[in-house]
Amino acid sequence: VESVRSCDVEALRARNKLLEARQRISMELIADQGMSREEAARSIAQRLRGVMATILVVDDDEIIRTTFRKALRHFNVLEAADGEEALSLARENAIDLVVTDIHMPGMDGYQLLEALRNEFPEMPVMGISGNVQPERAGAIGFDTFLDKPVKLADLLQGVRESLAVDEAEVAAEVAA
């Protein structure tokens, strides 16, 4: 119980850090540059990647989403149960990485990937499935692919690799 409370406190501190940074950056941008909301949202998202990346986890299995959210507790994690919900969240939030199951009811991972590539061509997308060959997933266009059952160490490694370029770019921009 104590370790769970410790994780909860850590997660709250991380979220507070994100909210404080988001508020500070928002006010600076709006006051200094007179940006539109859309311009401010894009610029804020870019700066926040250096503070805390936002990862969208998409899976129809709630247990997998919960497990991934806990494993990725040092990131801002959003969850969706299907591709349609994920696409809506991607349109409303600045997403740095999408981690999606491939086989889901409704809009599956392939359809989600296609929609994300059309609207957000630079957004990295990691595919996850127990029923797809990694070569096929790569050929379809997923940036990274993991077989289910996913080892959490592999998930974390894949996330780090997917976000490394963006974090370095943002760190340089924020330092300037």
Image (cartoon, grey):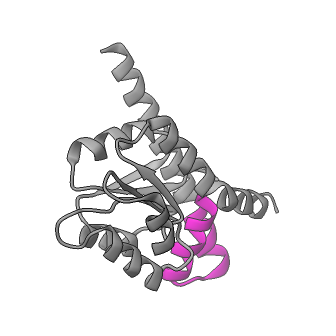
Query: Which image quadrant is residue 101 in?
Result: bottom left
- 143 over 50 or under it: above or below: below
Q: Residue reaching furthest left? A: 105
Q: Position of residue 109 (x, y in %)?
A: 33, 67
Q: Position of residue 112 (x, y in %)?
A: 34, 73
Q: Residue reaching furthest top? A: 2
103, 72: nearer the viewer: 103
Q: Position of residue 63 (x, y in %)?
A: 23, 41
105, 140: nearer the viewer: 140
- 152 over 119 or under it: above or below: above
17, 84: nearer the viewer: 84
Q: Residue at x 33, y 38 (%)?
A: 67
Res 159 seen here: yes
53, 149: nearer the viewer: 149
Q: Residue at x 55, y 75 (%)?
A: 42
From the viewer's perspective, tell me whether residue 42 is left or right of residue 80: right
Q: Position of residue 1 (x, y in %)?
A: 30, 15
Q: Give the dominant element type of the magenta stretch: helix, strand or loop.
A: helix
The image quadrant where one finds the C terminus is bottom right
**Which segment is the magenta one?**
25-49
Within the magenta stretch, is there residue 47? yes
Q: Residue at x 45, y 42 (%)?
A: 72
Query: Which image quadrant is residue 24 in?
Result: bottom right
- 112 over 150 or under it: above or below: below
Within the magenta stretch, is there residue 76? no
Q: Residue at x 55, y 66 (%)?
A: 45
